[in-house]
Amino acid sequence: MEPFPDLASLSDDDLKQLIDDLTKEELEVSYRRRILHGKIDLLRAELQARLRETGGKGVLEHVDMDKLAGKAAPPSE
């Protein structure tokens, strides 16, 4: 991540450009996040369907259902 610029040294045009650039970057990140969440939702639904079908037998019997349902605590940093 780039260091935050010295705002006093930026012209009005530079400041507006920086705002535009960061807004565009935020939109791109937000879009990517929505795509990833959609994929995760589809994968969780498939896994849950398999668990229902097999009654939890086999490789999937050790799945943490709270984590699968998105109820687990976020990872610590």
Image: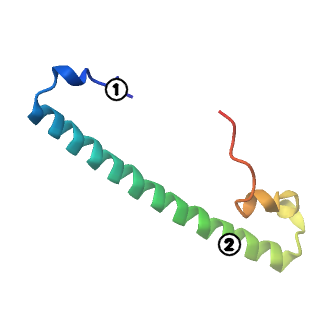
**How far apart are labels 2 and 1 at the CA level?**
39 Å
Image x and y of residue 12, in percent:
11, 33
Question: Nearer the viewer's eye, disc 2 or disc 1?
Answer: 1
Looking at the picture, does residue 35 appear above or below residue 72?
Answer: below
Kind of residue indicated by mark 2: Glu
In the image as oriented, which residue stretches furthest toward the bottom? 53
Q: What residue does disc 2 label?
A: 46
Q: Which quadrant holds residue 45? A: bottom right
Asked which quadrant contains residue 75, the reply is: top right
- The residue drawn where x is 35% and y is 48% is 26
- Would you place residue 57 above or below residue 9 in this image? below
Q: Nearer the viewer, residue 17 or 63?
A: 17
Say what secondary structure mark 2 lies in: helix
Left or right: 57, with 65 as reference point: right
Residue 74 locus on image (x, y percent):
68, 46
Q: Is the residue marked by circle 1 packed among few (<14), some (14-19), or many (20+) residues within 10 Å?
A: few
| The C terminus sits in image quarter | top right
Residue type at tag 1: Glu
Toward the front, the furthest residue is 8
Q: In front: 63, or 28?
A: 28
Which residue has dot 1 on it? 2
Please tell me which of labels 2 and 1 falls first in the chain: 1
The kind of secondary structure element at disc 1 is: loop
Is 16 located above or below residue 30 in the figure?
A: above
Image location (x, y in percent) of residue 16: 16, 40
Q: Residue at x 87, y 57 (%)?
A: 62
Mark 2: few/some/many CA within 10 Å (<14, 14-19, 20+): few
In percent of width and height, residue 68 lies at 74, 61
Image quadrant containing the N terminus: top left
Query: Residue 22, which numbered label?
Result: none
Of the pair 2 and 16, the residue shown nearer to us = 16
